[in-house]
Structure formats: structure tokens, C-alpha cells
Image: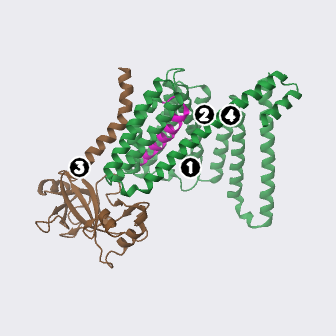
Chain colours: A brown, B green
Amino acid sequence: MKAVLKIVTLILPVLVPGLLIGVHTSNREAGQNWRIAVEGYDPRDLLRGHYLQFRYDWNWDEVPGSSCEGDHCAICLEASNASDNRNPRASMMTLAEAEQQCKSFVAGAYREGTGFRIGNGPGHGLRRYYIPEARAEELDELLRNAEGSFHSFEVGLTLDGSGQAVMDQMYLDGIPLEEWLELNP
Amino acid sequence: MFIKRKASKWLEAGLLTSEQAARIVEFEKNRGSNYFTRGLYALGAFSILVGVLSIVAANWQDIPAEAKLSVHLLVNAVVAGSIPFFDRRGKRLSAELAVLGLTGLTLTLIALISQVFHLDGPMASALLLWMGISTPFVLVYGQTRVSLLPWIIGFVASLFAGLDAYLLEELDPSGQLVAMVAVAGFLPLAFLQCSALLPEGKRPVLSNLLSMTGVLFAIAIPTVASGWWYEYSPRDDIDSLATQLLALGALGLAGLAVLFVRLSSNVRLLLAGGLIVEALPLVFTGFESGVFSAFFFVLFWMFLAFLANRIRSHLLVLLAVVVIAIRIYVVYLEVFGSLLETGFGLVLSGVLLLVMVWVVCKVGKSMSGRGKEGEAS
């Protein structure tokens, strides 16, 4: 018994990360996927280490904040175009309402000033994306001047039935960022 | 070679016989060459490791995420498998290095998963997961400081990060104060108690590390708490009598625990003294003064010097004297700092510094002399 427990202690550090990889891969592949436009939100601090920081540019149906404020909010997403998952129409509601009325929603918190933040945990609210260090400055510049240079940044979000969101990947001008970087060396 | 010169000096002074001197020189010579060979092996291994890491880092973006995760997972599995392999063959150092390696690799794998899947989580959750899955194998297989010291540093860092992200963030300022005071009161005790709970003589290094961590907290926390006498300190968050009583109650409970937990009398005294230093600024909330802060700081470190003298730790006595001297100099600058604008102030500061250095040296020498007399008697 003691020998088995000793072996279990060594299996844990391999098994748990292995399970995590499986769960995250499955979460990313299952559920409804949407592409949301993003923009830089703080000209001083878009780039932190290897991460590009951004905020979501939701396609609001109505002014957010009028229907929910606080921790238990959600954004209900509906396709703008039946055959497309890009730029869905977004409407803010309480989490309880979203669970009843909405096919696809992302749970989070809404506060005046900071806007909607995905999730309620102490994390960053899925607002940063890992990018290659060698192209970091260039991408920072592109995101900073996205409007002027006619580049569009989007982030793919996969949503499960309970409103939990998983970040899929970033898109630049409609193609996955990694591919864009290869096409534009 | 220094040892040869030293041995001949000791021989001249009649401390060694010529045979003993020759044996010491021979012993050190062999030991030195062993170190040299091991050092070269370690340097070679280190160079290979850095080389491999550099090659991987240079091509990091071109390696598919699945490959990065699979290879990392495989490396972790191989290192995990090597631990019982080395352990059964009695290769202690290799087993310890493998435990240390797996501890580090577990953290890097968690970081890699977080990077590949762009996970939304604070650093604290990664650290807590790391400690959660690393602690069992470190405690089972780690026997020496090679694996246990980095683990305990990681454990403490994860503990503080977890408290900050999952407890303090959830509380209002007065709740944060009560939680902080409770942690300050119980943390040293928790480490000391964990050490005491280990079977006697079974895990000496782990027991020693846990008790050392407890003692370090028992010294560091009251030292920081003496700063609560200043204006703008955490005690500003006491917004009602209930908060004040809750904070003091937490320290009182910690005090009761100190009475009932199995500890040596010196450690019990250290913990009790620390709790008093932490409680006083919470009792007398109306008093705000840098001089009070310095007074309780100095008082606590004098108490430490007294305890250090009881256990005949001359190094700790000297450290206490030096720390007290620096604190007195700081309070002098705080109180009479404006005088520094004049030449008179500079001269006075210089004289004060010289006098204090002289006093520190005298006290240190006197303590050291008394210690030697005590040992001789």
C-alpha cells in the first residue's frame, strides 16, 4: 500500500497536467465558436512581455450597462449573418436571463468605466494573447494603429453551454495570426 | 596551496604533529581533486542543458503546440520515473536532483499549458496547482536541502500568492486587516507545529527547514508590524470596534495556541514576544509616531538578542546589535533629518555613525568573549 502511494505521488505531476491538456483541447474543439473584433485599450501598455493586451469591441445591440451591472452578467451572442460566426450581435443581460433565453452566451462582470469583463475569477478576463517575441513590436504597432492602417484584429472565443469562454486564437485581417506572420515575414 | 601553508603554521604552533599535518594536507588534496572532477562534469552537463534550451528557444514559434506539450509531458514522465530508479539504487544525489528537476518541470509544464491555451487565470492559481501536485512527491522522495529548500521557498511564495488572490481580494479593507493579522499570528506557529509533528529523527532536514521557516516568520512579522505605529499603516483600515476586537482576538487565539503547542521555551518566548509587538499598535490606535515604531522595533530585537544569548548563538546576537544600530540611525534621520541640510547636521550624523559602529564592535567582541568563556567553563 505504501509503495503504491509512493508511486501515485509521482504519477500526479504527469497525470494532472495531462488531464488539463485533454480538457482544454476538448473545450477548444467543442462548443460554439465566435470571432470578436478587438482593439488596443491603453496606448502605454498594449505589450506586456510576450503578451498582446486588448479589449473586445462588442457589436452591441443596445447600450451596455442598462440591463445588468455587477458580477452576474452575461453577453448573449447571435449571428449577424446566418452563415458567419464573425462580429455577432451582442446584448447584455443578467446571467439568469441568459441561461434561459440565450443559445450562446459569455458570462462575466460589467462595471461602469471598465466595461464587460469575461469571467468572474481573479484572472485577466481573456484579454491577452501570447505572441512571438521577435514580432512583438510589429504586432504592437499594428494593433495600436489598426484603424489607420486598415488592419483588423479578431479573437476566436469558444463558448460552452454555461457561458464559460475559451480563447481559440487571434486573427489578423481574417486569417490566423500565426499564418499571417508566415505570409508577412 | 593554502592548506599546506596553514598546516605548517599549525605545526610550528604545536597544534598538530607532523604526521597529522601530512594527513590533513593529503586529505584536502584528494578532496580538492574530487571537487574539480565533479565540477567539470557539472559544467559539461550544464553547458549541454543550456545549449539544448537555446536551440529549443530559438525555434520556439516554429514548434507546433502539440509537439511542445507532448515532449514536455514525456520529459516529465521520464524524470518522474527516474526518481524511484535512483532511490532504489541508493544514488541519493541523483534522486535529489531528479526530485528538484521534476518540481521545476512541473511548473514549466503548467506555464506551457497556460501559454498554449491562452488560459485566463492569475499566477496564484498556477502556483497553487504546482504546489498541489509537487508537494506529495517532494515530501515522499526529497531528503536533503537540494530538493527541500527550493520546495519550501516555492511553497511559501505560492501560499502568499494564493492568500492574496483568493482571500484578500475577496474581502473589504477591514476584512483584509483581520485576515492579515490572523495569518501573521498563526503562520510561524503553523510551520513550527508541522515540524514538531514529524516523527522524531525521521526527517531531520525537513523538520529543520520547517522550524527555520517558522522562526524566520516569527522574527520577520513582528519586525514589519513595528512599522504599524506609523501614519498610513494597515491599521488605518480598522473602521469599527468589532474589527479591532476581531484582529486582537485572532492574535489572542494565536497566543493561546502558543501556550498549548509543544515548543521549546525559547521559541515559545519568541512567538509570545512577537504577538505582543503585533498587538500593541492595534490596541493603541490613536498613537502614531515614528519614534514608537523605532522603540518597539529596538525592543523586539533586543529581546531577540537576549534569546540568542540564551541559546549561545553569537552570530544572531551580533546581527541583532547591528540591526538595532541601523534602526536607531534611521530614526535619528527621521526625527532630526532637517538638520542634514546644514554642515552641522552632516558632522553630527558622521559622529553618530562612528560612535555607533564603535559600540557595535565593542558589544560584538564582548558577547563573543563571554560566549567563549561560557563554552570553556
Q: Which mark is residue B270?
A: 2
Residue pictured at 24% horizontal, 68% vertical: A174
**Chain to which the residue tagged by mark 1 belongs:** B
Same chain for the residues at labels 1 and 4, yes or no?
yes
SS for dot 2 = helix
Above/below status of B191 relative to B121: above
Disc 3 + disc 4, Cβ < 8 Å = no
Task: For label 4, count other residues whose C-alpha is less than 10 Å away and answer few (under 14), some (14-19) or many (20+).
Answer: few
Residue nearest the observer in this picture, B154 or B25: B25
Q: Main secondary structure of the magenta part?
A: helix
- Label 1 and label 4: CA atoms lie apart by 54 Å
Foreground mark, 3 or 1, reads: 3
Please tell me whether residue B340 belongs to the stretch shown in magenta.
Answer: no
Task: For label 1, count other residues whose C-alpha is less than 10 Å away and answer few (under 14), some (14-19) or many (20+).
Answer: many
Residue nearest the observer in this picture, B231 or B266: B266
Same chain for the residues at labels 4 and 2, yes or no?
yes
Above/below status of B323 relative to A93: above
Q: Which residue is mark 4?
A: B33
Residue pictured at 47% horizontal, 39% vertical: B101
Q: Which residue is mark 3?
A: A27
**Chain to which the residue tagged by mark 3 belongs:** A
Foreground mark, 3 or 2, reads: 3
Foreground mark, 1 or 4, reads: 4
* Rendered-image quadrant of the N terminus of chain A: top left
* N-term-proximal mark, 4 vs 2: 4
**Chain to which the residue tagged by mark 4 belongs:** B
Disc 2 + disc 1, Cβ < 8 Å = no
Residue nearest the observer in this picture, B101 or A120: B101
The stretch of residues the image draws in magenta is B142-164
Foreground mark, 2 or 1, reads: 2
Residue nearest the observer in this picture, A184 or A7: A184
Q: Which residue is mark 1?
A: B228
